Image (tube, rainbow, N blue to C red):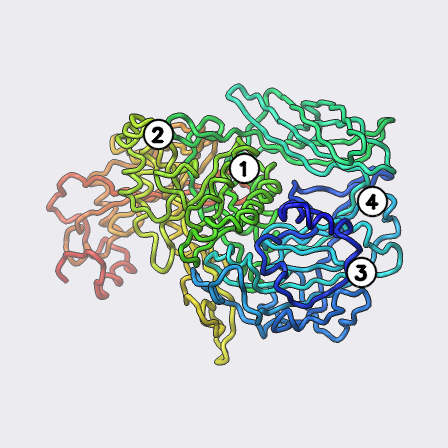
């Protein structure tokens, strides 16, 4: 077509099929020009990236929820795209004899697709490494379903979008016999304008999707996890008015005087047979949505013949509460598109969290002016039965487990997550490093694709669409260009685009994570030793960098404390540095969940399956079993240590007062606790109690908590002697070793934990008492009979030095 001849491929990718010629019919034959073999063809017919939108009915003035197409679809698994029937995309194609498959889901984990097996590799591509080529024997899944629209929906009133939130690895899509387009990037939406292809009324709509397991984009998705395929995220329709808001960019800021600002850029689309939008009304509502705290109206002007435009403005509000992971306060932004008579043409909304992210001249990452300490973990999207399909309940389970173990940050390793994840992190409070779906770990050299101009458009597109989708989420504090793809010219281009589009957040990239590259705003290496972290962030290094005129940057480990097997043993060494060296600001443990699948063996055993358990070759065995929780989300034992080290409250023992001192690690929020304490001597309980701490302010230090401990003198020995059966045999009490155990618990429930949840614990060896008297303090007759009977049994007590 005309457009194909004169437009660059990256621009032509966004031209709808209707403008490329006639409405295209299905042609499933393989040629050398197939899009899954061409790095320049990665988004044919797809809409550009944008913030999530909401449906709206102009006639009723109410929001329209998405129409979910999830459920049971017909499915057929083929060995190769060459086997796809030529008429598969036609509206009258008969798939009635095919089995059903659940959408969303991975076909390898369902009966209809189980002839194709899961494959786990860490680095090695499970196909010949020859980009952009992939094998002709390329498992191909054909999905087929039908649906009807409500009678109230018509093409005259609505523009309708079909969205696939995630398809692995690529897909061709037909609706009612018309070819909609092609999509790659398995972790971002594939969205098509289907208004002109829909059937309205009682006639069913026929949707057909051809999914290939491998494509040239697979070379960018080599991310140390299971290779799985299919439509694994939600599929839905969204109805918008014919004149509508097409994108919202809301950048919030917060200052030390509790003033908040929202910089707005709003895009519109207008069709000529609809009233022309003339005004945008923007209102900012308080966290309860009961009052408007700021509002502006912006005039809209379309140029002659133009169907798209945008306006920009700013809302300002005073006495706002900031957003942070400790107190994630959210405001509601409501946008109304108004016509010539003030009629409401469309409504959009998004949640706003007031916060400012910046790197200080001293090289410290700041959130709302405070040094941020990253208590992070890398999280793959993984379920032990459903694979890469995770539900709202799964996500909440992860968030609550993280919060209960004192994590405050997540890196979305190594791809953008389901869009619901960001909503939940906004709501419950987790800082997110949002990572692009780029990893070329298996390439030789690793930077091969990042250094090849042929691959620049598709790599840049992955970063752009991630940013465009997630830009309004306050939880996203850092953008990541991907992982383990070397360092090539493409990374500088991607960094420059992100900086230009969104200067409100820093850029992170592991491949440039060492101290010499300026592609990343954060020194973010993986698996540096504590000594290396200290050397990079130490005051001496800071002075040297300043003297050389180099930019100071925070040091945040993108991966550390690899949690495979009996691991995480020296993590305290890192935390001693994180808490004392200003530019050493934490890191992200590798990783969250053991990527095992629940599998039943022929012998009737139930196991957590890993690489090789499905006959997959090549494989990297159990290298996917390296989380801090088991596949069913049961915490590993090491989580107890991690929880204490990341605790938001530190506990010290004051030997002079025999009391405690509490110090808050929270930057913004106050807290109330109950302190449970117990004294044991030689392993036997002596006394215990509970003390309320009604208020501990943010960053408050040394709050005294008095404990009613009696003096550690012979009185304690007498009490111990009365409880310890060993004194019967010795005639004198055994040497005293006393410990105070302290548990700090929540005084009130939160969204993620009940009252009484243990936030942290500590144990202190109490000072030794004065020298004891040589006079026996107890005899067999003074010991209760039960204790005396126990004393006559064998003594096998750890640390016992007495003779029997």
Please say if the residues under marks 2 and 4 sit with CB atoms less than 8 Å apart. no
- Mark 3, mark 4: which one is toward the viewer? 3
Identify the mark nearer the N-term, 2 or 3. 3
Indicate the position of residue 681 as horizontal and vertical percent values. 26, 48
Near-viewer residue (115 or 284):
115
Q: Is 316 displayed left or right of 344 in the figure?
A: left
- Label 4 Cα crowd, 10 Å radius (few <14 / some 14-19 / many 20+): many
Please tell me which residue is depicted at 85% across the width and 53% down the height of the picture.
150
Indicate the position of residue 148 as horizontal and vertical percent values. 83, 58
SS label for mark 1: helix
- Label 2 Cα crowd, 10 Å radius (few <14 / some 14-19 / many 20+): few
- Label 3 Cα crowd, 10 Å radius (few <14 / some 14-19 / many 20+): many
Q: CA distance from mark 2 to mark 3?
A: 59 Å
Near-viewer residue (702 or 277):
277
- Mark 2, mark 4: which one is toward the viewer? 2
Among the 4 quarters of the image, the one containing residue 717:
top left
Identify the mark nearer the N-term, 3 or 1. 3
Q: Which mark is residue 176?
A: 3
> Circle 1 is placed at which residue position?
497
Please tell me which residue is depicted at 57% across the width and 51% down the height of the picture.
395
Q: CA distance from mark 2 to mark 1?
A: 22 Å
Q: CA distance from mark 3 to mark 1?
A: 38 Å
> Circle 4 is placed at which residue position?
158
Q: CA distance from mark 1 to mark 4?
A: 34 Å
Please say if the residues under marks 1 and 4 sit with CB atoms less than 8 Å apart. no
Regarding residue 694, the answer to whether it shows in the image is yes
Please tell me which residue is depicted at 72% across the width and 50% down the height of the picture.
192
> Circle 2 is placed at which residue position?
550
């Amino acid at each position: 077509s005309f457009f194909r001849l004169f437009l660059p491929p990256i621009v032509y990718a966004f031209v709808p099929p209707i403008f490329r010629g006639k409405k295209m019919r299905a042609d499933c034959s393989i040629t050398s020009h197939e899009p899954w073999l061409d790095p320049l063809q990665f988004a044919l017919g797809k809409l550009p990236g944008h913030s999530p939108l909401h449906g709206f009915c102009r006639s009723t003035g109410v929001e329209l929820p998405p129409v979910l197409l999830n459920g049971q679809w017909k499915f057929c698994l083929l060995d190769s795209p060459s086997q796809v029937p030529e008429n598969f995309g036609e509206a009258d194609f008969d798939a009635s004899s095919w089995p059903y498959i659940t959408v969303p889901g991975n076909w390898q984990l369902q009966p209809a697709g189980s002839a194709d097996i899961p494959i786990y590799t860490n680095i090695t591509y499970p196909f010949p490494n020859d980009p952009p080529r992939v094998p002709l024997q390329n498992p191909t899944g054909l999905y087929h379903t039908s649906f009807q629209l409500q009678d109230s929906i018509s093409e005259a009133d609505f523009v309708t979008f079909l969205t696939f939130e995630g398809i692995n690895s690529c897909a061709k899509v037909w609706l009612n016999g018309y070819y909609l387009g092609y999509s790659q990037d398995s972790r971002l939406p594939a969205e098509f304008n289907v208004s002109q292809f829909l059937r309205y009324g009682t006639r069913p709509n026929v949707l057909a999707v051809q999914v290939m397991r491998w494509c040239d984009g697979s070379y960018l998705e080599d991310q140390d996890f299971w290779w799985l395929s299919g439509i694994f995220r939600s599929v839905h329709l969204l109805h918008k008015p014919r004149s509508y808001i097409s994108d919202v960019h809301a950048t919030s800021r917060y200052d030390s005087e509790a003033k908040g600002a929202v910089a707005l850029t709003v895009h519109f689309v207008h069709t000529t047979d609809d009233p022309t939008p003339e005004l945008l009304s923007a209102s900012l509502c308080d966290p309860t949505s009961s009052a408007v705290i700021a509002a502006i109206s912006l005039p809209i002007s379309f140029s002659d013949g133009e169907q798209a435009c945008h306006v920009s403005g700013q809302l300002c509000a005073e006495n706002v509460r900031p957003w942070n992971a400790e107190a994630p306060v959210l405001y509601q932004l409501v946008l109304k598109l108004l016509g010539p008579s003030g009629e409401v043409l469309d409504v959009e909304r998004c949640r706003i969290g007031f916060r400012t992210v910046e790197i200080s001249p001293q090289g410290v990452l700041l959130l709302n002016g405070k040094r941020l300490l990253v208590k992070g973990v890398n999280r793959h999207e993984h379920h032990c039965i459903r694979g890469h399909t995770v539900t709202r309940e799964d996500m909440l389970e992860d968030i609550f487990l993280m919060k209960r173990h004192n994590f405050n940050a997540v890196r979305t390793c190594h791809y953008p997550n389901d869009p619901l994840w960001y909503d939940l992190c906004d709501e419950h409070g987790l800082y997110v490093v949002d990572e692009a779906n780029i990893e070329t770990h298996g390439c030789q050299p690793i930077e091969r694709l990042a250094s090849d101009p042929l691959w620049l458009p598709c790599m840049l597109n992955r970063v752009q669409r991630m940013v465009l989708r997630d830009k309004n989420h306050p939880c996203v504090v850092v953008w990541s260009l991907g992982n383990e793809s070397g360092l090539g010219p493409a990374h500088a281009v991607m960094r420059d685009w992100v900086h230009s589009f969104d200067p409100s957040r820093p850029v992170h990239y592991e491949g440039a994570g060492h101290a010499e590259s300026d592609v990343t705003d954060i020194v973010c290496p993986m698996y540096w030793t504590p000594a290396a972290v200290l050397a990079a962030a130490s005051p001496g290094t800071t002075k040297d960098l300043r003297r050389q005129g180099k930019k100071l940057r925070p040091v945040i480990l993108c991966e550390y404390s690899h949690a495979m097997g009996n691991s995480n043993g020296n993590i305290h060494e890192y935390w001693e540095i994180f808490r004392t060296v200003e530019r050493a600001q934490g890191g992200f443990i590798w990783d969250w969940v053991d990527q095992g699948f629940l599998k039943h063996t022929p012998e009737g055993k139930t196991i957590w399956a890993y690489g090789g358990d499905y006959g997959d070759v090549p494989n990297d065995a159990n290298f996917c079993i390296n989380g801090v929780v088991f596949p069913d989300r049961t915490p590993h034992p090491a989580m107890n240590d991690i929880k204490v080290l990341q605790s938001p409250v530190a506990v010290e023992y004051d030997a002079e007062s025999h009391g405690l001192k509490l110090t808050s690690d929270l930057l913004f929020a106050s807290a109330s606790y109950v302190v449970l304490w117990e004294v044991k001597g030689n392993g036997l309980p002596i006394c215990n109690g509970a003390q309320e701490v009604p208020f501990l302010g943010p960053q408050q230090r040394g709050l005294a908590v008095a404990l009613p401990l009696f003096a550690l003198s012979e009185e304690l020995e007498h009490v111990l002697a009365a409880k310890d059966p060993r004194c019967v045999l010795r005639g004198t009490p055994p040497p005293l070793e006393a410990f105070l155990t302290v548990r700090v618990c929540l005084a009130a429930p939160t969204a993620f934990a009940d009252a009484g949840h243990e936030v942290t614990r500590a144990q202190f060896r109490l000072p030794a008492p004065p020298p004891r008297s040589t006079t026996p303090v107890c005899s067999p007759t003074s010991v209760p009979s039960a204790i005396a009977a126990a004393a006559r049994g064998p003594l096998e007590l750890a640390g016992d030095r007495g003779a029997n």
